[in-house]
Image (cartoon, helix red, strand yellow):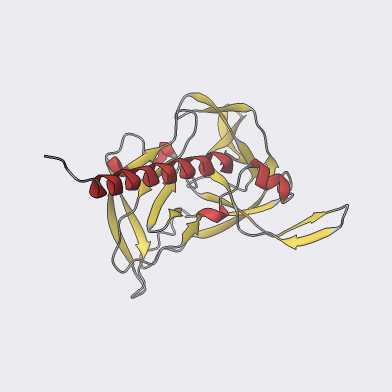
């Protein structure tokens, strides 16, 4: 997922465990000049990692010639208060995008949409993340399968209905979180997909991007101050 947090600042956001122990990654992005994709290597030294217990990382993106990515503005990041104000919660329709094994997008990147509903919104730290080996906060969505979806964004989708007063409105595609795992259940001695995706809450994503924005503003302010302050002999 590409997110913009300030003018001219763009980041590739994914789950932290996706890039764990890597020094760099290669991404594929659709081209704006032809039916093909372009590749770009990203150095993870330019990455902002969320604190322990939050499975998120944001990697600074350079200008990539001929690339045509879909960028998510910071205005679509939402926290718990925003969800409450908009009646987004258990039962709300959501969608995510990912890739299917065997459908590799050899000519262009062609993500597949999956639709689901939120099944749990919780403040509790209950999910034992097998990658971080920590108990973490998490939401759940009822999803047919979360395989190959780690790091994928979860968007609000459809309409919400409220009473007192009666309201019916279409939801904007707010980012409610990022897929970070799935629930497994034992069947005949084996663990199988329980069709429940575990989501890093959107509030943690919003907090991370706000922290990055503040860091960039402070850095720009320091550079401006140094440039404008005369050097005394």
Where residue 140 appears, x then y in whole percent? 63, 39
Q: Quadrant of residue 48?
A: top left
What residue do we see at 68% from left, 38% from top? 121
The location of residue 94, given as percent across then percent down, is 64, 53
In the rendered structure, the answer to whether residue 28 lies left or right of residue 189 reads left
User: 22 and 68: which one is in front?
Assistant: 68
Image position of 9 (left or right of 39): right
Location of residue 70 with respect to 152 vertically, above or below: below
User: Furthest residue to the left?
Assistant: 233
Front residue of 189 and 206: 206
Q: Residue at x 72, y 45 (%)?
A: 84
Q: Is residue 165 above or below residue 136?
A: below
Position of residue 227 measured from the top left corner of the image (x, y, whole percent): 24, 49
Q: Is residue 170 visible?
A: yes
Residue placed most toward the observer, 148 or 136: 136
Q: Quadrant of the C terminus?
A: top left
Which residue lies most toward the front here? 233
Could you tell whether 168 is left or right of 179 in the image? right
Kindly give the residue lying farthest to the right in the view shown: 164
Residue furthest out toward the bottom: 34
Asked whether residue 43 appears in the rendered view, the answer is no
Residue at point 30%, 56% (across, down): 62
Task: Give 108 or 73, whichever is nearer the viewer.
Answer: 73
Q: How many marks?
A: 0
On screen, 99 above or below 193?
A: below
Q: Position of residue 127 (x, y in %)?
A: 58, 29
């Amino acid at each position: 997922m590409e997110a913009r947090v300030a003018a001219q600042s763009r980041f590739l956001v994914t789950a932290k465990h996706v890039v764990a122990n890597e020094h760099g990654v290669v991404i594929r992005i659709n081209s704006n000049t032809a039916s093909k994709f372009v590749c770009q290597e990203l150095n993870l030294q330019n990455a902002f990692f969320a604190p322990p217990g939050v499975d998120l990382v944001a990697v600074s993106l350079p200008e990539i010639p001929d690339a045509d990515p879909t960028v998510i503005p910071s205005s679509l990041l939402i926290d718990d208060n925003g969800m409450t104000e908009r009646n987004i919660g258990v039962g709300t329709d959501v969608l995510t995008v990912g890739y299917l094994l065997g459908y590799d997008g050899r000519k262009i990147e062609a993500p597949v949409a999956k639709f689901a509903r939120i099944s749990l919104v919780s403040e509790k730290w209950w999910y034992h993340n097998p990658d971080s080996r920590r108990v973490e906060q998490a939401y759940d969505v009822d999803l047919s399968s979360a395989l190959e979806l780690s790091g994928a964004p979860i968007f609000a989708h459809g309409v919400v209905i409220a009473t007192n007063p009666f309201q019916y409105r279409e939801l904007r595609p707010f980012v409610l979180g990022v897929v970070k795992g799935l629930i497994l259940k034992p069947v005949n001695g084996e663990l199988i997909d329980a069709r429940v995706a575990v989501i890093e809450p959107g509030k943690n994503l919003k907090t991370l991007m706000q922290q990055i924005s503040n860091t960039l503003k402070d850095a720009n302010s320091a550079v401006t101050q140094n440039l404008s302050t005369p050097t005394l002999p």
